[in-house]
Amino acid sequence: MPKFPGEGHLYQGRYKSFPVQTDRHFLLVCRYVERNAWRAQLVPRAQDWRWSSLWRRAHGSVEQRQLLSPWPVTQPADWLALVNRPMRTFEQEAIRQSVKRGRPYGDPGWQARTAAGLGLEHTLRNRGRLRKEKQ
């Protein structure tokens, strides 16, 4: 039995959050999340995964859509096509690192400033101990 609500095998751990730089970065993160089932080859199109926010927005009842929070930016008109289009590898990897480490997601300079301002410098460093230099 999970110790906390929102934790357990269904959630695969606790909720993750990290700072995101701009509207463009926000949309990339949303695209990454909403294409999870498609990327895992569970459905032919991302909007076909009935348990996703994308499905609710595309096919859900009024009541189901009201459960979703409004986005802080306007969703692009071609959102379904964008979500179903493969993402660039470097974008996926950058988002994965932000999810995994709680690292700010954005341009490198912004990441460094934001990490310093929020005390998240450790999220930018590689994990583990520093190697001793040979003398």
Image (cartoon, rainbow, N blue to C red):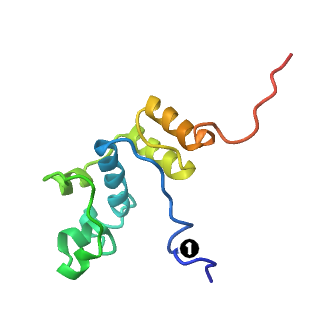
Which amino acid type corresponds to the residue marked 1 in the rendered image? Glu
Disc 1 is placed on an element classified as loop
The crowd level at tag 1 (other Cα within 10 Å; few <14, some 14-19, many 20+) is some
Corner quadrant of residue 51: bottom left
Residue 12 appears left or right of 127:
left
Q: Residue at x 18, y 79 (%)?
A: 62
Relative image position of residue 43 (x, y in whole percent): 30, 67
Horizontal arrangement in the rendering, residue 68 relative to residue 131 (left or right): left
Instruction: List x then y, in percent, for residue 69.
Output: 30, 67
Work out whether 78 lies above or below 111. below
Q: Nearer the viewer, residue 35 or 67?
A: 67
Q: Residue at x 24, y 52 (%)?
A: 73
Of all residues shown, which one is farthest toward the top? 135
Q: Position of residue 54 (x, y in %)?
A: 26, 65
Q: Residue furthest left?
A: 77
Classify the position of the C terminus by image quarter. Answer: top right
How far from the left and from the top, in percent, is residue 26?
33, 49
Q: Do we see residue 61 in this rendering? A: no
Residue 43 visible in the displayed image = yes
Residue, disc 1: 7
- Residue ranking furthest to the right: 135
Foreground of the two, 47 or 65? 65
Q: Residue at x 56, y 73 (%)?
A: 7
Quadrant location of residue 75? Answer: bottom left
The residue shown at (29%, 45%) is 23
Image-based side of 98 in relation to 31, left or right: right
